Image: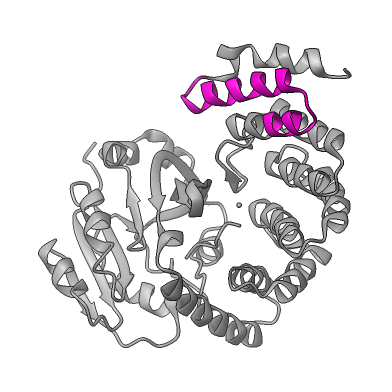
Amino acid sequence: MDQPSISLCMIVRNEAEYLPKCLGSVMRMVDEIIIVDTGSTDDTVAIAKAFGANVIQMPWGDSFSAARNRGLEEATGDWILWLDADEVMDVAEAGKLKELLTRDAIQEQCVEGLQFYFIHHMKAGVVEHNCLQRMVRNRPEYRFEGRVHEQILPSMLKANPGMAIGQVDIHVHHYGNLVPNMVRQDKLRRNISLLLQSIQEYPNYRQYHYYLGVELYRLNELEGALRCFNSVLSAPTGFSKTMLSTAHKNRLITLETMGRFRDMVQYSEESTALFPDFTDLYHLKAAGWKALGQTDKAVDCLQQALSLGPAPEEYSSEAGFGTYVTCRELGILYASAGNLKEADLYWTLASLMGSGAKNSDLGLTDIAEEREGGTMLQPDR
């Protein structure tokens, strides 16, 4: 079977610092690069052209969807891949993408879009991960919607209700949280302005309230962020499991930042009841108990997290929760309680897990059984 062609479509503005690494990570597996530039004043356009990109100049019109769709109009590939400039595909894995697109399962399961495994590099060395759609078959009826945090899935479902979104084991590294704070704040305020416009235009699309909560939190406007998350969780119908579980997580993070630890523990009961396999929620519950001086209860929560292991891929989860981060935190708690023997054990386990050892290699299940009874994701931008 002939390998399908792939068009890379991007929208950029003043991304000279990040664009070379992004384009370099995918240039060998895409057949064309289409860049929609919305007003760069640095070397972004020259860099894009050096990679052979077709650069389209488009005035910024307060709509990410309009800019993305302009690029899609020019795409000639069988499939369309889209990335942001601060995202880099794993070069070693990218080469297998075209072969994956020839698999019979793609046709048999009516796969019209693909998700990738995203690794979000946060401040202080924290890494979070989730799955995001970044490929779609090139069909004119598939177009982005929304001024900001634009989505293509609604148009896909409208045009083809029986279609499926597949997932490939290819990693994309996202570095957007590491950009200078002033630049981030400008982008956040821009996003908030667009979200407020969107809420007025589409009052029934309540996902905008979730995104607004995330942006307000990142600007340290905590009361507003908490109101948004409470609004989402008070009427959760229509949200995906990923977004709804992350809203629960973000509410707990917001309460922690506000120092409202009793509320944090109380709400965590509701959250873990709804998502009992979401490891991050037990970590947050443990943080609440720790802040309240309830070390034993914090230990119990972390033991639950350890028994669960890493959260399933459908959740937005911090790397190390359920493994080495959990063991490290258990070590800290045991040390604070004066139990240095247990502390040393868990710190040793944390070190081994951090080096790549698996739970089964360490006999961790047996250890947990013997003792039984005895960071906010930014949205997709």
**In the displayed structure image, the side of residue 222 where residue 291 appears, left or right:** right
Give me the residue at 59% from left, 68% from top.
218
Q: How is the image coloured?
A: one colour
User: Whole-percent x and y of residue 21?
Assistant: 24, 55
Give me the residue at 38% from left, 34% from top.
104
Q: How many marks?
A: 0
| Nearer to me, 258 or 47 | 258
**In which quarter of the view is residue 259 placed?**
bottom right
Indicate whether 208 appears above or below 102. below
**In which quarter of the view is residue 47 placed?**
bottom left
Give me the residue at 79% from left, 63% from top.
233
Prevalent SS, magenta region? helix
| Nearer to me, 60 or 301 | 301
Farthest residue in the front direction? 338
Indicate whether 185 appears above or below 34. below
Indicate whether 30 appears above or below 305. below
| Nearer to me, 319 or 292 | 292
Give me the residue at 18% from left, 74% from top.
43
Let me know if residue 264 is in the magenta part.
Answer: no
User: Whole-percent x and y of residue 37?
Assistant: 27, 77
The residue segment tinted magenta is 330-357
Q: Which corner quadrant holds the N terminus?
A: top left
Let me know if residue 349 is in the magenta part.
Answer: yes
**In the displayed structure image, the side of residue 102 where residue 184 appears, left or right:** right
User: Whole-percent x and y of residue 313?
Assistant: 58, 40
**In the displayed structure image, the side of residue 207 where residue 248 appears, left or right:** right
